[in-house]
Image (spheres, rainbow, N blue to C red):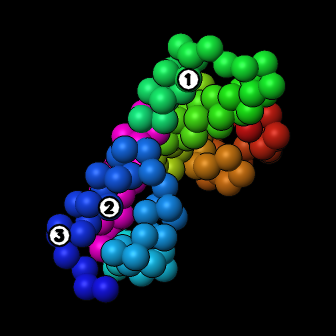
């Protein structure tokens, strides 16, 4: 099947409506799943469009689950409804940042801590009395020449 913008928009709309990519690709008028994945690997913009469609689709799942909660459910179907609700909530927490229940902190650069001090003695003016730490396991330490004291790296980490 030939890749076209109309076909991609149709796939994107169906995902936004809560359909899975697998179920969409089962249809005869759609390309198979491996073809879609191949297109996504070749086109970063398409990959981002599909991911955004999945995020919106997760919101659709949550809307459907809210509708399910508003209905009367037969006692023998309560367990199945609970599983559907749990799965939708879990999926939304992975795809939609607003529903994520964990705080995510990312360090985008190499951590660098510089500690400088001045001992107040004029004989040390101009000397670099500093410790520079990089990362968590490696460190560069600049000490005053002739100083016998060694720093314990376990105390700094």
Give the residue number, with chain letter if any, for mark 1.
68
Q: Is residue 37 above or below residue 112?
A: below
Compared across the picture, whether 152 is left or right of 17 comes to right
In contact (CB < 8 Å): disc 2 and disc 1: no
What residue range appears in magenta? 43-59
Instruction: Characterize the local packing of mark 1: few (<14), some (14-19) or many (20 or more) Cα atoms within 10 angstroms.
Output: some
Residue beneath the point at 65% across and 34% down: 84
Image quarter hosting the N terminus? bottom left
In the rendered image, residue 45 lying in the magenta stretch gets the answer: yes
The part of the image, by quadrant, that contains residue 24 is bottom left
Give the residue number, with chain letter if any, for mark 2.
11
Instruction: Characterize the local packing of mark 2: few (<14), some (14-19) or many (20 or more) Cα atoms within 10 angstroms.
Output: many
Q: Secondary structure at mark 1?
A: helix
Residue 18 spot, x, y in % from top left: 43, 45
Q: In terms of depth relative to the viewer, which is nearer, 49 or 25?
A: 25
Residue beneath the point at 59% across and 30% down: 89
Look at the magenta stretch and give its main secondary structure.
Answer: helix
Residue 92 spot, x, y in % from top left: 52, 35
Residue 123 spot, x, y in % from top left: 50, 33
The extreme front residue here reads: 74
Label 3 to label 1: alpha-carbon separation: 34 Å
| Marking on residue 76 | none
Label 2 to label 1: alpha-carbon separation: 25 Å
Label 2 vs 1, first from the N-terminus: 2
Residue beneath the point at 60% across and 25% down: 101
């Amino acid at each position: 099947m030939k890749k076209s913008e109309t076909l991609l928009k149709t796939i994107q709309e169906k995902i936004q409506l809560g359909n899975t990519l697998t179920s969409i690709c089962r249809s005869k008028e759609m390309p198979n799943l491996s073809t879609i994945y191949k297109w996504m690997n070749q086109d970063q913009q398409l990959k981002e469009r599909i991911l955004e469609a999945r995020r919106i689709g997760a919101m659709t799942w949550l809307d459907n689950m809210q509708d399910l909660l508003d209905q009367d459910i037969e006692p023998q179907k309560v367990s199945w409804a609970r599983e559907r609700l749990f799965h939708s909530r879990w999926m939304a927490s992975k795809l939609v940042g607003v529903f994520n229940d964990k705080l995510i902190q990312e360090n985008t650069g190499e951590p660098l801590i510089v500690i400088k001090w001045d001992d107040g003695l004029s004989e040390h003016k101009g000397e670099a009395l500093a410790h520079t730490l990089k990362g968590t396991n490696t460190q560069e330490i600049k000490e005053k020449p002739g100083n016998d004291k060694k720093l314990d790296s376990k105390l700094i980490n």
